[in-house]
Amino acid sequence: MLRPADDVGHHDLGVAAEGLGFECVSRAEIGQVLQTVPGITRERLLFTPNFAPRDEYRWALESGIRVTVDNIDVLRSWTGLFRGREILLRLDTGHGHGHHEK
């Protein structure tokens, strides 16, 4: 189970001990989790950036942090960065409804 990193506080030491992970949208949020939850493994972090620079994707991948890609252009343009790596892919099915019923 993951929780948003912007909800991280000192009470999360207990949460982390229960094996939960954290979803982070920025390198700063990852830093906040690493500082607040000492000893958390990188595998329990999920980096889900929007329009992040290539260097941030590279940093996360090289740090052992799981990464979500939500932009086909990123995959097409930076193929070498992702080749041979395990990533998560967020898809837009083209229906425009998102995850909420309208």
Image (spheres, grey):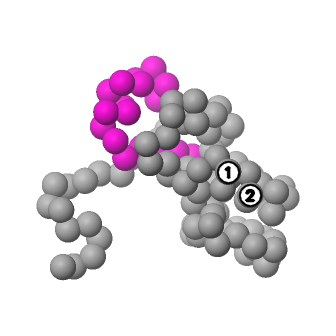
Residue occupying the point 37% across, 46% down: 70
* Residue at mark 1 to residue at mark 2: CA–CA distance: 6 Å
Residue occupying the point 68% across, 37% down: 63
Numbered tag placed on residue 32 in the rendering = 2
Extreme top residue here? 80
Q: Is residue 76 magenta?
A: yes
Which quarter of the rendering shows the N terminus? bottom right
Residue occupying the point 18% across, 79% down: 102
Q: Which contiguous range is marked in magenta?
A: 66-82
Q: Position of residue 30 (x, y in %)?
A: 68, 52
Extreme right residue here? 38
Residue denoted by label 1: 28
79 left or right of 66 in image: left
Q: Quadrant of residue 98?
A: bottom left
Question: Which kind of residue does numbered mark 2 sit on?
Answer: Gln
The image shows residue 81, relative to residue 91, as above or below, that is: above
Residue occupying the point 30% across, 37% down: 72
Q: Position of residue 46 (x, y in %)?
A: 57, 53
The image shows residue 83, relative to residue 50, as above or below, that is: above
44 left or right of 83 in image: right
